[in-house]
Image (cartoon, grey):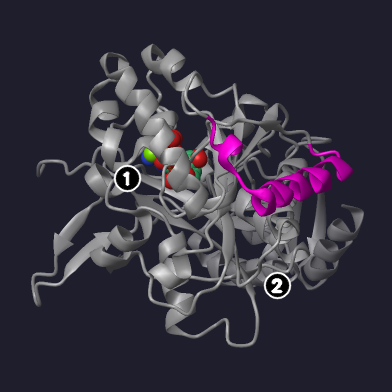
């Protein structure tokens, strides 16, 4: 045998039956998105590297060390596998002038790529579902996005997810805070780890986002951005909170919540669970009013979030909320090959009538013994075995055998009445 080729580290195959959980989650998301009038957008997985450098910021973890970048062999263009999708959505919105007649509400689902150390809840190819509202200002739109995620948790039934919010204010307000932060960290330089030292002058705000417990005290005693916010920023933050309270959405203010990417202003938020260990943030987002202009569009506001699909599915599993794996309604037992053409026609009729039916098949192409076929029928989880025996078929009939409730019971049905039978089953369900 030739040597096996395996998947790239940190990149996972999503296999049945688990893939059904993905499809189910995606279906729930589509439903909730459509209730909020968010429309689907699909952008390329590969984008020009410059898009991410410009939008995420040079000194972010993602741009500094996590991007899969390469040169197009044919024309030398610098390309990157998307590490997130807000940048791609904004690029597409600008490129196609989608905001010319007002704002747009969009959502996406798909794979993202970051060169991180793989561990539970952290992969190199992972998946995000994201929602973006572009061209709209106002804390009520920030609230709408939070309500959208909240509604999704409700639809899924997940518990113990908490919401943390903060305001990053406006760039000028951050500037004054930045100076105060640098003074604070300079005074305690010996307490900063290597990342902290490196970010001291390039991006001190990000030091607040450290996951190093040894830096907890120096970060907690740092000046709070909230204390540097002007009237308008504080008012927006207050309005957001009023709306959340009016909708009974519990939240806490986390003054150290700054988010990993540079493009945020005003509202930022994260949904966090304690059930997943260190990788507890399942959804994160905020407002990014400067981003569209930064990417080359006419200035326009934006706000959005992205959730980590692997983490959400893991949480659903922890809380025992995943649906049972799908099974076919019926399994076709076909004792001999001569019956195959008639059986296949009948199966098509049943499928058209809405039943899920599985045809018996084997590696050799032979049908195999009656007994082995029934074993497969049982293992498939189907409710019924349809037996297309030569004797039944000679009478224009098929035998329907119950495999679950009332196992063993069987009845003969004329082939001509199969579709009707399928319909009657569905009206029972
Ligand atoms: P973290 O602090 O966990 O690295 P982040 O701030 O880099 O997260 P975002 O860029 O905000 O993450 O992405 C939004 C969400 O996508 C995260 O909250 C998380 O649920 C998920 N996510 C991010 N990176 C990964 C990854 N490498 N593997 C799995 N999920 C991820
Ligand atoms: Mg990260």
Q: Secondary structure at mark 2?
A: helix
Tell me which residue sits at (41%, 73%) in the image.
91
The numbered mark at residue 60 is 1
Q: Main secondary structure of the magenta part?
A: helix
Tell me which residue sits at (53%, 71%) in the image.
41
Q: Secondary structure at mark 1?
A: loop
Ligand 1 near label 1 (Cβ, under 8 Å)? no
Q: Position of residue 172 (x, y in %)?
A: 48, 53
The magenta segment is: 224-249
Count of numbered marks:
2
Tell me which image quadrant ligand 2 sits in. top left
Q: Quadrant of the N terminus?
A: top left
**In the displayed structure, would residue 197 be above or below residue 133?**
above
The numbered mark at residue 352 is 2
130 inside magenta stretch: no
Would you identify the image quadrant in which residue 204 lies?
top left
Q: Nearer the viewer, residue 168 or 9?
A: 168
Would you identify the image quadrant in which residue 133 lies?
bottom right
Q: Position of residue 154 (x, y in %)?
A: 77, 42
Q: CA distance from mark 2 to mark 1?
A: 53 Å
Q: Is residue 36 visible?
A: yes
């Amino acid at each position: 045998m030739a040597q096996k080729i395996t998947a790239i580290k940190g990149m996972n195959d999503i296999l049945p039956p688990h893939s059904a959980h993905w499809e189910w989650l995606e279906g729930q998301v589509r439903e909730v998105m459509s209730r909020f009038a968010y429309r689907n957008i699909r952008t390329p997985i590969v984008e020009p590297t410059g898009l991410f450098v410009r939008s995420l910021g040079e000194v972010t973890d993602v741009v500094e060390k996590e991007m899969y970048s390469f040169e197009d062999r044919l024309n030398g263009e610098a390309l990157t596998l998307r590490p997130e999708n807000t940048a791609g959505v904004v690029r597409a919105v600008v490129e196609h002038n989608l905001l010319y007649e007002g704002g747009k509400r969009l959502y996406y689902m798909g794979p993202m790529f970051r060169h991180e150390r793989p561990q539970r809840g952290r992969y190199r190819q992972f998946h995000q579902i994201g929602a973006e509202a572009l061209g709209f200002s106002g804390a009520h739109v920030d609230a709408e996005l939070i309500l959208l995620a909240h509604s999704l948790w409700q639809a899924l039934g997940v518990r113990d997810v908490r919401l943390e919010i903060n305001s990053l204010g406006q760039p000028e307000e951050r500037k004054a805070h930045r100076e105060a932060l640098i003074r604070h960290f300079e005074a305690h330089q010996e307490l900063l780890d290597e990342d902290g030292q490196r970010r001291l002058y390039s991006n001190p705000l990000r030091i607040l986002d450290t996951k190093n417990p040894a830096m907890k005290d120096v970060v907690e005693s740092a000046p709070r951005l909230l204390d540097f916010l002007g009237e308008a920023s504080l008012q927006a933050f207050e309005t957001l909170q009023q709306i959340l309270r009016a909708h009974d959405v519990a939240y806490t203010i986390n003054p150290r919540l700054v988010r990993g990417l540079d493009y945020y202003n005003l509202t930022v938020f994260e949904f966090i669970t304690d059930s997943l260990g260190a990788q507890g943030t399942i959804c994160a987002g905020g407002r990014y009013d400067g981003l569209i202009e930064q990417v080359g569009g006419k200035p326009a506001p934006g706000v959005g979030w992205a959730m980590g699909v692997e983490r959400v599915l893991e949480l659903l599993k922890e809380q025992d909320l995943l649906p049972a794996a799908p099974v076919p309604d019926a399994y076709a037992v076909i004792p001999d090959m001569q019956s195959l053409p008639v059986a296949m026609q009948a199966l098509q009729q049943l499928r058209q009538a809405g039943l899920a039916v599985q045809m018996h098949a084997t590696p050799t192409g032979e049908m195999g013994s009656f007994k082995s076929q029934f074993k497969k029928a049982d293992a498939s989880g189907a409710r019924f075995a349809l037996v297309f025996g030569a004797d039944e078929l000679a009478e224009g009939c098929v035998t329907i055998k119950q495999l679950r409730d009332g196992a063993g019971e069987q009845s003969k049905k004329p082939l001509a009445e199969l579709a009707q039978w399928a319909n009657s089953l569905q009206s029972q369900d």
